[in-house]
Amino acid sequence: MSDVAGSDGDPLEIEVPADPLAGHPASAYLWGHVAGSGDVGEDTVEVVTNDETSANVLAAVAGGDIDHDTTSREYAHDASITRTEDEYTLEIGAGEDDDGPTDAGDGLFGRSGTLGLPVDGRGHYRFSAFASHDRELLRGILEGCGTICFKSSSGTVGISFVHDDEALLEATRELIEDCPVDAPMGDLSETSSGGYWFGVDDDAAPAFGTWLYEDCEETGLYAPSRERKLRKSLEQAEAYD
């Protein structure tokens, strides 16, 4: 177990797996995040999140150093709109000690380069090891490359996934199709910025979002800011009705 400071200052108790590559809820959450907003290099794994608590949870699971910055970026669905937000970058991999750089393999979970990581040579992720932990895997992907919003024009909750990697979004769609909640989705489409996106149907978004976060406080494997956004959006939709 590892204690992580939550958004309210109270510690979150995280069950940390002995091997962050084995099938485990925490490793599924980690690799969902890496797939959604990360990068796997020869010497390091890097993952980016906008939630400080989530960054600390990921560091508790996999180790590494967190760097905090503020960034402005284009909105995925409309490149004419920019937003400024906190950004926490976790770098896992080769570090330095008193004698200089340490061995990269030691930093990458004892593996030599990317060998043995859940990503193939073309950059496609292999999620089979986390098949029993689809909720945590999907939650990590959503927090890495997804959006939750209240649509004031229709009074509904919107949940969508946006990424440059079409294959990742296709894999995400398969995970959603296999989840225990009926969650129809729209077609995979191109964004104005050159990536791809799809959304869960508005009628299914409340049930899907509730299922996705229903056990998060027990495990600590979540971004509190994203859970609050979902809860607020659901409350707004109910008030609209």
Image (spheres, rainbow, N blue to C red):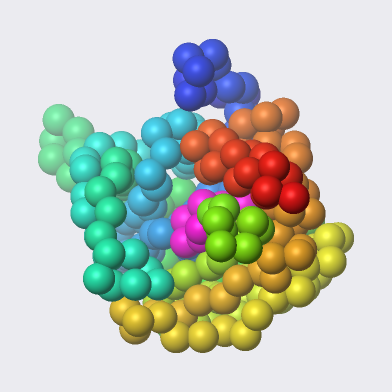
Q: Is residue 51 above or below residue 138?
A: above
Q: Nearer the viewer, residue 7 or 202?
A: 202
Observer-nearest residue: 140 or 161? Answer: 161
Q: Is residue 225 above or below residue 145?
A: above
Query: Is most of the magenta stretch helix, strand or loop?
Result: helix
Q: In which quadrant of the rendered image does the N terminus lie?
A: top right
- Residue located 51% across and 58% down the image: 147
From where the camera sits, is residue 230 visible?
no
Q: Residue at x 25, y 37 (%)?
A: 68
> Can you give x and y, in whole percent of width and height, for residue 198 in the image?
57, 76
Q: Is residue 153 above or below residue 47?
A: below
Q: Magenta span has 102?
A: no
- The part of the chain drawn in magenta is 138-147
Q: Quadrant of residue 41?
A: bottom left
Q: Please state the horizontal and vertical placement of residue 187, each as a whole percent of the image.
A: 62, 85
Foreground: 236 or 98? Answer: 236
Q: Quadrant of residue 82?
A: bottom left
- For the point 39% across and 47% down, which residue is it? 49
User: In this rendering, would 175 be left or right of 193?
Assistant: right
> Visible in this render: residue 14?
yes
The residue sitting at 22% across, 54% down in the picture is 72
Q: Position of residue 78 (x, y in %)?
A: 34, 72
When asked about the image quadrant of residue 114, the answer is bottom left
Q: Would residue 204 be found to the left or right of residue 39 on screen?
A: right
Q: Is residue 164 above or below residue 36?
A: below
Between 127 and 74, the residue placed more toward the observer is 74
Residue farthest to the top, as pictured: 10
